[in-house]
Structure formats: C-alpha cells, structure tokens
Image (cartoon, helix red, strand yellow):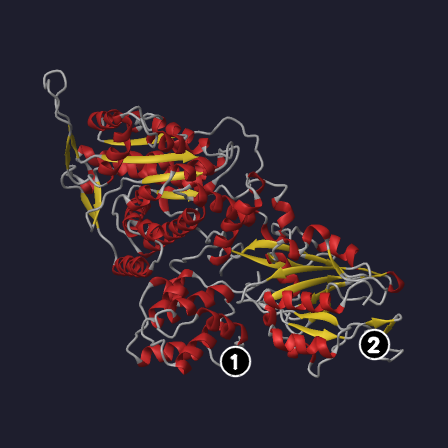
C-alpha cells in the first residue's frame, strides 16, 4: 500500500474503532487496478471484502485484527449512520470527465457550517464528517443534495485514510481538520439535515400544513384528559388521530403532552413512531372523541366550539379583520364615519377607539348595565409613527367643543397620580387622550422613578373598578391646606396612542399578572400598511345627528324626558334582551374554559376581563343606538363580543412573541419577529450573518434562541422552492391564517 505499511493501516483501523466508528475491510489498488482482479471493476478499491459489506462493520478489535491478518493490503472503510454513533459524511466529489463539480454545487447550497473533521480523497474530492441527533434519521444517497455531493449515513460507508485511491494517491486527513490531532466531529447544522433528507427534516412541519385554532386545541386537550395513555393500542390510535389533522408539530406536541402522563413514555420511541405514522391511516379525530366520551367526557359548550357560535366570535391568530368589526352600530358608527371621512390617513380602528371612549364618557354616571358595570373604557391604539393615530384624538376635541362639553376633555399628559385624581374630583366624568403612552409606561418602570409617577398606574387601576362607588383620597397632615379629596362615582375613560416597539418593550409579565394590562382593550393596527394621504378641504361641521345625540344624553341630568330623575348613585339600568344575555353568558363560559386550559399564565390573565369589556361595549352600543329607550340587543352583544375577542386574541399572540422579562427572552422574541416579518421567503443562516437583529449576536449565542423557537413550535427549517436550487430557511409556522 504505497508508503503505508500494513501495521500502520491496522493501527488506524483500530484507532477508528476506538472512537466508536465501525470499520470493515474493502479492496485496494494494485498496479492501478482493483485487487478483485476484474479489469472492468465499477468500484475499484472501494467494494467490500466481507460477505455482508457495511453490515459486517464492527468496533471489536479482535475481529478487526483477524480481518487485516487475512487481507493485509485492504483499504479501510467506515460504516456511517447509526452503526458509528450517527456519523454523517458529506462526500464532495469532482469528476471533470463527467462534467460534475461537487465543489460548485456545494458553494451554491452551503449556508455555513462549524469547523469539523475533513478528509481529502486522493481523487480531488473531500469528505466532511458530522454527527447528527439520535432522533433524526438520515439515509445514504447519491446526488441527494446536488450533482457531485453525496450523503453517507445509514446504509452507507466511506473510505478512510490511509487507504489507497485508484489515482495512486492515498486518502488523508486535511492538515487543519485531522481527528488524530484532537479535532472533533461537529454537529450537523439544521439546514444540512433538511437537504440530506431530500428537503424534509423528519422533525419539521411543512409551512403549508394546517394550524389548529386555539378553540380546537382546547377541545382536544379536554378530550385527551379523559383518555388513559398507558394502553399501547390506545396510545397508537390517539397518535394516528392527531396525525390525521395534518397539523404537524402542533399535533405532535399535543400527543406528547398527553403521552408524557404515562410511565411508559419514552421520547425516542415517541418521535420514531410519530414519524412512521400515516396521516391517512383510517383513524381520525372521531375515534379520539369516541374514546373520550366512552370515559365520561362531554363536549364543552362554548362560543368557539360550534359553527353557530363561530358566527358570534372567532378566536384566531389570523390578521384578517372580521367583517363589520370597525363599523359599529348606532351613533358610534356615525362618529367613526365622521372621523374617517375627515382623516388625511383614514384609520377605522383608531376611529372606533376614539368614538367608543367619547360615547362612554358622555354616558358616564348616567347609565349602567344589568351587571352593574358602567361606561368607562380604557382603549389603546397602536400604530407606526405618522400612521394616523393623532387625527381621531383631534376630532374628539372638535366634537366636544361643538357640543360645548370641553370640561369632559382631560389633559393630554399626566404629571402625577394625584393630578389624575384632582382632575376627576373637579369633573367626575373625564376622557384622557394620551399620546406616547408607551413612553409613559416605560418611565414608570425606572428604578428611581418618583412615587407620584408610580401612583399614575395605581390610580388608573383603582378608577377602572370604582365607577359605582366613592373614592376617598389621601390623608395629609395639614387638612386645611390639603383637605382630603372625595370623588363620587367617577367615570374615567382613556384613549391612549403609542408605537408598537415602545409599547411592547414597556410591558413585562408583572403588568399582565397584576391585572393592569387586561383593563385595556388594545387595538394593534401597526402591521397594516399606512393608507395613502388624502388632501382634504377644511373639516366639515360636526354632523347634526351626533350633536343631537349628545344633547339628548345631557338632558338626562336636567330631569327632562322619559328618563328623568336619575343621579350618579342610581343611574338608568339598561337591560338586555334574552338573546343578548345568553350570548354574553356563553361568552363568559367560553372565557372560563380558556383560562382553565391555558398553559401560558400571561395570556391566561389577558382574558380575565374580556367579558367585562364586552358587557361595557354592548351597553355603550345599546345607548348609542337608541338613547330614548336603550336596550342591549343581539346586534350589540354580537358586535361587542367580536370586537373584544378579536383584539384580546391578537394581544395574546403579540405578548407571547414580544414581551420579555430577560435579555435572552427579548433576543428570542426579536428573532421571531424578524423571521415572521420575512414571510414565506424566510431567513437563512447566511441572512443571519448580514441582517439585524441576528448579526448583533455571535452564531454560538444565536443558536439557543433559534432552538427555543423550533422546540416551541414557532419556526421551522424548510426548503423553499425558487427558480434555482431553492433555499433552506427558517420560516414562522403561524405566518398564515388559521381559518
């Protein structure tokens, strides 16, 4: 064997076996021909000398010595795949005579990989050595990745140094990548796993696969709770039923979440079985529900669990806005249209927020619902800079001025918590229209922030729930100069505007768990493109129908009309129709199911005041539709439920993606936002080295965040078809509608 003695070859073979690589002998080259003696040999110096080839590969030293005593001139072959501890070798071959350039192919598809063991083949090619996880299956194949780039894993083998190539040169370790010098075999990068599996990683979820809506997930979890995970047949049937949903990793997560309750749960077996299950195996969700019913489960009753109720409210991560969501009934709709028609950048969502808080303030202290709730509302409009958030606030002031009710318009900044209370003491029904609300929230979190600033948040929380009582102010030492304040039945409404980045950066989990954030209905329209600017003449006069409604409401305090004699302590009670009451009761029941089944504490807390918001909005709509004989009917209840549920669900999704309590969590959230924003194009490893926020972190620091997103079912690595060879990229799983 050229310049290598047979003792050296045996020594190397034993060394490889000591590393856990299973070896076996193959033919070599003698005088330019294969030692098999066949002049037309199709694989000179590479085909096995043992009966079963790579299947005979071993790490047993005695067997290896016996082989090389028998074939001292043999080349060394290493069995790849599971036999050698999940060893993967990428074979980059160059065959100019056939017009094949593996190096050219590799340059086109390579997206970066860690330093690893590398061998030079003697024929101008290269072998790159990687290890892959036990949970992944990779099979050998020729041209799997592209012309001249082969995959050697399960069912394959490679020739190892110092074997002799037909060219007369020996295989050798690349000088800087020699395992005998301590260079370790690196873990295979995710993008390469996808390519090795012919563009589909065994653990990936296809981008086009179904994503189960939250309501369906809740229904499945409630059914699975009644099924025993121990019996193998039941375990398998449930897996097949969930696989039939085509929901990929989401369905696998539900199966694992349920299976882990059994002492028989074994992760590797779970993953292997799931991979082998057919999504069309004849068992569907009906079997799963039958098993659950057989053990006492009954289908939950809730708005989102039947087609009838889906017409009322949709719990969806879809960006699609339900029809009519920003066209509320009655005078609220008239105010919205007036604001939109006079806007340079018409933004109906912000107009609705402005109209609701305006109407709630005007109705304040005069009406209440059956449940005792009144009309104070906290709404937040989130949008990008110069997207049209300012115009609705401006037109509310125009309306109040035209109605001679400027006293209802509160300041546009809050200097302190006490200033807030003093304003309510002067005028018990006030609308505060605050800009840069996110900056205010950020200032309240500063370590050394003043006590009077902290009281802003405390007093807002207090005022939200004190509309049906009396608030007694702070006791001061000098009662003559600073007497104790008393606010009777305050109606404090708030319409705040902010930009998305500042708002979400200002929120931590404590704001959610404390119940501060769920007092607000947050309307985030920042992902919708800004409409084109319109050039408008001077704003028209406020429509007479709006001013007439306001005057009618104001007349209530004078004791005129059929609603005379009211006072803040005993306002007019606005009743519901039977259908409206039933819809809101069902909505409350559905919210309780969400809260009880929710695994995320933060998003769970966001739902806790959703029914309260819907009840208030329905009350405002009922009065806005007919102030002379107000009643909450089916139309008002349906619109209120739809408006609240849509925006709470959207906020819950944003909170999960963007709210962070630690630098690592913020990095993970930022990565997800960037990947989601990339859409179907996705983000490649190479992109990450060029673009923010990824390039702000070293690759080794990025890896844990990317793995967290993959394991959490947020992103997937997949091959995206292009005009060329395609691109391997990370894509957000829920970047498409769930409907």
* Foreground residue among 637 and 629: 637
At horizontal 57% and vertical 33% (from top left) the residue drawn is 534
Q: CA distance from mark 1 to mark 2?
A: 50 Å
For residue 476, side relative to residue 384 (left or right):
left
- In the picture of the structure, the residue carrying the numbered disc 1 is 281
Q: Residues within 10 Å of mark 1 (few under 14, many from 20)?
A: few
* Foreground residue among 68 and 704: 68
- In the picture of the structure, the residue carrying the numbered disc 2 is 35
Q: Secondary structure at mark 2?
A: loop
At horizontal 72% and vertical 70% (from top left) the residue drawn is 76
Seen in the picture, residue 580 relative to 274 is either above or below; the reply is above
Residue 275 rendering spot, x and y as whole percentages: 53, 72
Where residue 559 sits, quadrant-wise, is top left
For residue 642, side relative to residue 387 (left or right):
left
Residue 735 rendering spot, x and y as whole percentages: 53, 54
Residue 34, disc: none
- Counting labels gives 2
For residue 622, side relative to residue 544 (left or right):
left
């Amino acid at each position: 064997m050229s310049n290598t003695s047979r003792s050296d070859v045996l020594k190397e073979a034993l060394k490889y076996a000591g590393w856990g690589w299973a070896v076996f002998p193959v033919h070599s080259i003698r005088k330019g021909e294969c030692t098999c003696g066949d002049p037309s040999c199709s694989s000179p110096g590479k085909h096995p000398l043992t009966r079963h080839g790579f299947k005979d590969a071993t790490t047993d030293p005695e067997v290896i010595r016996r082989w090389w005593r028998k074939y001292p001139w043999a080349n060394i072959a290493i069995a790849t795949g599971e036999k050698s501890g999940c060893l993967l070798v990428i074979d980059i071959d160059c065959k100019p005579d056939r017009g094949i350039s593996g190096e050219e192919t590799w340059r086109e598809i390579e997206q970066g990989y860690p330093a690893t063991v590398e061998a030079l083949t003697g024929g101008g090619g290269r072998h790159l050595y990687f290890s892959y996880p036990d949970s992944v299956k990779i099979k050998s194949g020729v041209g799997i990745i592209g012309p001249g780039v082969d995959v050697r894993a399960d069912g394959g083998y490679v020739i190892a140094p110092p074997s002799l190539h037909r060219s007369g040169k020996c295989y050798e370790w690349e000088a800087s990548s020699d395992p005998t010098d301590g260079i370790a075999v690196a873990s295979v990068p995710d993008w390469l796993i996808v390519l090795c599996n012919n563009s589909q990683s065994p653990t990936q979820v296809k981008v086009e696969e179904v994503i189960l809506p939250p309501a369906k997930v809740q229904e499945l979890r409630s059914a699975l709770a009644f099924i025993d995970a121990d019996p193998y047949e039941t375990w398998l049937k449930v897996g097949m039923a969930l696989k039939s949903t085509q929901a990929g990793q989401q369905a696998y997560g539900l199966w694992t979440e349920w299976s882990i309750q059994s002492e028989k749960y074994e992760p590797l077996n779970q993953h292997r079985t799931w991979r082998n299950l057919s999504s069309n195996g004849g068992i569907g969700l009906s079997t799963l529900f039958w098993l659950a019913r057989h053990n006492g489960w009954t289908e939950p009753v809730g708005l989102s669990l039947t087609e009838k109720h889906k017409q009322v409210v949709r719990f969806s991560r879809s960006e699609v806005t339900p029809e009519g969501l920003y066209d509320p009934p009655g005078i609220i709709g008239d105010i919205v249209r007036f604001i939109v028609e006079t806007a340079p950048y018409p933004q109906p969502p912000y107009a609705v927020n402005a109209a609701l808080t305006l109407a709630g303030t005007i109705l304040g202290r005069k009406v209440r619902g059956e449940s005792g709730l009144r009309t104070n509302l906290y709404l937040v409009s989130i949008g990008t800079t110069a997207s049209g958030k300012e115009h609705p606030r401006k037109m509310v002031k125009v309306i109040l001025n035209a109605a001679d009710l400027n006293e209802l318009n509160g300041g546009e900044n809050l200097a302190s918590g006490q200033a807030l209370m003093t304003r309510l003491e002067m005028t018990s029904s006030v609308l505060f229209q605050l800009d840069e609300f996110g900056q205010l929230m950020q200032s309240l979190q500063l370590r050394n922030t003043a006590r009077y600033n902290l009281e802003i948040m405390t007093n807002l929380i207090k005022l939200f729930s004190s509309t049906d009582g009396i608030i007694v102010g702070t006791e001061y030492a000098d009662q003559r100069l600073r007497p104790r304040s008393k606010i009777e039945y305050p109606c404090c409404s708030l319409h705040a505007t902010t930009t998305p980045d500042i708002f979400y950066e200002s929120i931590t989990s404590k704001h959610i768990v404390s119940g501060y954030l769920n007092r607000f209905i947050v309307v985030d329209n920042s992902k919708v493109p800004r409409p084109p600017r319109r050039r408008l003449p001077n704003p028209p006069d406020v429509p007479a129908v709006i001013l007439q409604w306001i005057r009618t409401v104001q007349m209530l305090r004078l004791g005129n009309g059929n609603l005379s004699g009211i006072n803040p302590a005993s306002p007019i009670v606005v009743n519901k129709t039977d259908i409206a009451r039933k819809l809101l009761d069902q909505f409350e029941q559905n919210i309780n199911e969400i809260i009880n089944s929710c695994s995320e504490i933060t998003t769970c807390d966001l739902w806790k005041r959703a029914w309260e918001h819907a009840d208030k909005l329905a009350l405002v709509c009922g009065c806005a539709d007919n102030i002379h004989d107000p009643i909450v009917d089916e139309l008002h209840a349906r619109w209120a439920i739809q408006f609240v549920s849509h925006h709470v669900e959207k906020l819950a999704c944003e909170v999960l993606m963007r709210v962070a309590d630690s630098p690592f969590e913020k990095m993970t959230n930022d990565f997800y936002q960037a990947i989601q924003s990339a859409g179907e194009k996705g983000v490649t490893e190479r992109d990450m080295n060029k673009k923010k926020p990824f390039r702000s972190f070293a690759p080794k620091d990025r890896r844990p965040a990317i793995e967290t997103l993959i394991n959490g079912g947020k992103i997937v690595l997949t091959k995206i078809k292009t005009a060329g060879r395609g691109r391997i990229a990370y894509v957000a799983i829920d970047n498409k509608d769930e409907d």
